[in-house]
Image (spheres, rainbow, N blue to C red):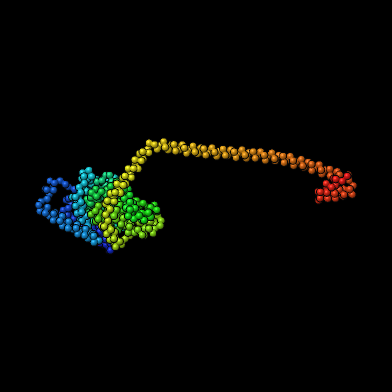
Amino acid sequence: MNKSPSAMQQQDGLDRNELLPLSPLSPTMEEEPLVIFLSGEDDPEKIEERKKSKELRSLWRKAIHQQILLLRMEKENQKLEGVPKSRRGEIWQFLALQYRLRHRLPNKQQPPDVSYKELLKQLTAQQHAILVDLGRTFPTHPYFSVQLGPGQLSLFNLLKAYSLLDKEVGYCQGISFVAGVLLLHMSEEQAFEMLKFLMYDLGFRKQYRPDMMSLQIQMYQLSRLLHDYHRDLYNHLEENEISPSLYAAPWFLTLFASQFSLGFVARVFDIIFLQGTEVIFKVALSLLSSQETLIMECESFENIVEFLKSTLPDMNTSEMEKIITQVFEMDISKQLHAYEVEYHVLQDELQESSYACEDSEPLEKLERANSQLKRQNMDLLEKLQVAHAKIQALESNLENILTRETKMKSLIRTLEQEKMAYQKTVEQIRKLLPADALANCELLLRDLSCNPNNKAKIGSKP
């Protein structure tokens, strides 16, 4: 027999000191008259037929009772105690009803009027992607950890139905975590209605569109908030080339459910149903500012990323309560609107400048390329002329060296011939002279070789 996620949480002992949500049993239509409104049936005639005066009085009694609960819930949140776990799903549905009564979507923005059961009968092209992500969604939670167990089957049905309802968005990974949080607090059909409320009425579906334009705007807004309110932290992240899309995109796409504890995520959902989409910015800014000192101590890209993905989500109860307090005290709606306008103005300016450059850009590129080629050509010509001059100088030097070499060789041959002639003459003289005269001649030659000046004296004698 399938167990409710509430019972599975109690058995697993996950409730300890965390703020984990408890899932109430699925209320019937008799127990929960608000389902009549949340089902999307707006035909006055059908409502009049279904409602009798006694039922209407009961409904008003229920609404007044839940309005009192709402006021108490707001006071309790201000006291940092949050929504009672057993009533959380009921309160979320009531807040959604109150919002829909005050803010009705235009017809063009309304989701298709197709029931949950009808959607489940159809086939979706996103089936494979959904099945792959079932095991990745809250893999350690007992309700979702069993492969194709009751939790995964409910999650598959919910994601399949929404992918068929919203053709533009279809299925995106982050939606599975949002749907999983809802399933922990209510039945499938109620979770489907609340998912429609978050996506269409509050406008979260914009960030899941294929172009991701809304997510880009959100990342720009968060960056500007850091720049304006925490300049040192902003500069530190920029110096290490860490943009909000690197760490905050999963926070926005999963509403913090993929990295943070379910107790903290449930508290964030409480405030989202109260205040809307800007809560995500408040929570992100509070998380970063609360750990600013520790982030500033991280000196490398890897250390900062590891801190933001692992250490930051690991908070104790007091740190969670501090974050929730800051979120309630923060008001950034005007800044977010100004940053969004600023983003669109910057995009328009970039687009206009690109359009203005489109016509002249090819010609300018060609002119720049031509001038660069001309400069390169002139440089090459100058280098070529210098090279020619060097070659000519080297050739001239080579010719001179060769000429000198030839002359030297000729002179050497002449000297060798003279030497040989002198040697022959000396040999002949030695043969002709007597021994005494030859000895005197050798002495004379030695004297002359030792004292060259004596040669002149001897030559001057008569």
> Residue at horizontal 84%, vertical 44%?
426
Residue 27 percent coordinates (x, y): 18, 55
> Residue at horizontal 37%, vertical 54%?
235
Q: Quadrant of residue 360?
A: top left
Q: Quadrant of residue 350?
A: top left
> Residue at horizontal 13%, vertical 56%?
61
Q: Is residue 352 visible to the viewer in this orientation of the structure?
A: yes
Q: Is residue 196 visible to the viewer in this orientation of the structure?
A: no
Residue 421 percent coordinates (x, y): 81, 41
For the residue pair 364 and 134, the one nearer the viewer reads as 364
Residue 54 left/right relative to 344 = left
Relative height, residue 118 to residue 147 (above, below): above
Residue 326 percent coordinates (x, y): 28, 58
Residue 297 percent coordinates (x, y): 39, 59
Position of the N terminus, as image quadrant, is: bottom left
> Which residue reaches farthest bottom?
16
Position of the C terminus, as image quadrant, is: top right
Residue 425 left/right relative to 309 = right
Residue 454 left/right relative to 150 = right
Relative height, residue 316 to residue 332 (above, below): below
